[in-house]
Image (cartoon, rainbow, N blue to C red):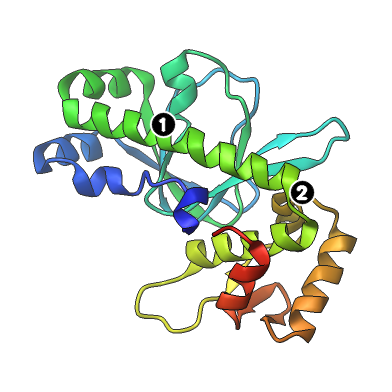
Amino acid sequence: MITKFTFNSQNILSELPSEDKVLLEKIMTDKKYRKNQPIFTEGTLPSGIFYLQSGKVKKYKMDNDGREQIIYIYNAGEFFGYSSVLSESTYGDTAVAIENSIISFITIRDFNEILKSSSSFSRLLLKNLSHEFSVLANLMAVLSQRTVRERVALNLLILHDKYKVKDVPNTYIMLSRSDLANMAGTVIETLARVLHDFKHDKLIATDGRKIQLLNIERLIQIANFY
């Protein structure tokens, strides 16, 4: 059920025909980004699209009080920034690396060329774009209709899915408290109280910035997203 709140562009490369995948990888230019380094900024014109090779990137908008509202966190294997290119508009949000990352860039010219030459890539991209609109609608509904406790539980589950590593038994979420508060649409002080309660109830364990989920089933019940 967590797929209601996560994009699935990680499937694009794996579902592409091998010749289209090779072509796509040839036109990618890799760049290293440091933690907290911006990738693009709201209101600027796009020059291409991005593919996250490794690391994590947050996508956010600023509210009227100048606070970040984190819309989404991208994981390795996800494309981003392409909706603005397709709509020929400025970026509607800001993207910043939240850990050291390697990001591939595809220019608008190369992007348009591969859209023309690969019907599979076009189809998968449009399919994912439609899914992303649904995900964002679900996330906005959560922010407007759920309690802080429910929102924090849900975002912990989303992050657990982002940070888990195959065949590794323990998943540790490594996110600043300010970013987690901005994901849940609350302030750090309120977040701290909710995390304290979750820790007291043995739903999570913390070690500095690290958070480990101990009782996923109970957190699912609290998040109330069945």
Check disc 2: other Cα within 10 Å, few if <14, some if 14-19, many if 20+: many
Q: Which residue is mark 2?
A: 185
CB under 8 Å between discs 1 and 2: no
35 or 154, which is in the foreground?
A: 154
**Up/down of 125 relative to 22, above or below:** above
**In the image, what residue occupies the spot 40% across and 46% down?**
78
Alpha-carbon distance for marks 1 and 2? Answer: 24 Å
Residue 130's label in the rendered image is 1
Depth check: give the residue in front, 2 or 84. Answer: 2
Q: Quadrant of the C terminus?
A: bottom right
Residue 23 falls in image quadrant:
top left
Task: Look at the image and tell me whether residue 59 can be seen.
Answer: no
Q: Is residue 14 left or right of residue 68?
A: left
Question: Residue 91, how many percent across, how many down?
Answer: 58, 24
Q: Position of residue 211 (x, y in %)?
A: 65, 75
- Residue at x 51%, y 76% (from the top left corner): 171
The image shows residue 109 at horizontal and vertical percentages of 32, 17
Amino acid at pointer 2: Gly
The 10 Å Cα crowd at callout 1, few under 14, some 14 to 19, many 20 or more, is few
Asked if 173 appears above or below 67 in the picture, the reply is below
Q: Is residue 186 visible?
A: yes
- Secondary element under disc 2, as helix, strand or loop, is loop
- Label 1: state its secondary structure: helix
Location of residue 49 by image quarter: top left
Q: Residue at x 74, y 42 (%)?
A: 144
Who comes first in sequence, dot 1 or dot 2? 1
Q: Please state the horizontal and vertical placement of residue 201, each as a whole percent of the image.
A: 75, 85
- The numbered dot on residue 186 is none
The residue located at (63%, 61%) in the rendering is 224
In the image shown, does 158 or 86 lie closer to the viewer?
158
